[in-house]
Image: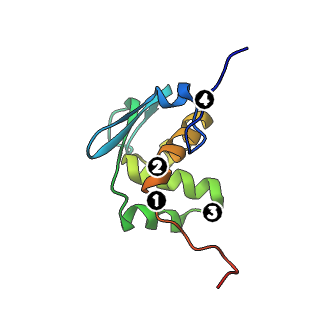
Amino acid sequence: MEVIHEDENGLSDAQLARVEHTDTAVIVTLLEPLTFKPNKLDDERTLDKLTLPRKVLGKHLKAMDQANGDLGKSLALIAALARIPARAAEELDARDIDLVMGVMEPFLPRLPATGRR
């Protein structure tokens, strides 16, 4: 039986092996390359890694305001952080979405619990 270790964010060793931390960024190697056109006039781009800033800014969080639902908000945040179109983020493998959100959690603000004073 394979032993799976997890870090404090619930990420396994296999997931963490796809993550590189630098002084200013978190680089996540994707399970499947992501191919998209930034806009209609651009050529297709293919990414095998997403580079996300360690410093999450208000503009990144604000992108979530335009999206509906929890998953939509997560995809909007990933798109803003990775500087890719929102429609490209929708094409990410679900396991990559889970990993990106897990590794970015320490850099996100703690939101107050609702209904408590």
Mark 3 against mark 4, which lies toward the viewer? 4
Using the rendered image of the protein, determine whether residue 91 is visible from the camera's viewpoint: no
Going from N to C along the chain, the mark reached first, 1 or 4, is 4
Amino acid at dot 3: Asn
Residue wearing tag 3: 68
Going from N to C along the chain, the mark reached first, 3 or 4, is 4
Mark linked to residue 14 = none
Q: Is residue 64 above or below residue 30?
A: below
Determine whether the residue tagged by mark 2 lies in a helix, strand or loop: helix
The quarter in which the C terminus is drawn is bottom right
Mark linked to residue 108 = 1
User: Which residue sits at x=40%, y=46%?
Assistant: 84
Q: Are marks 1 and 2 in contact (CB under 8 Å)?
A: yes
Amino acid at dot 2: Met
Mark 4 against mark 2, which lies toward the viewer? 4
Amino acid at dot 1: Leu
Q: Is residue 107 above or below residue 44?
A: below
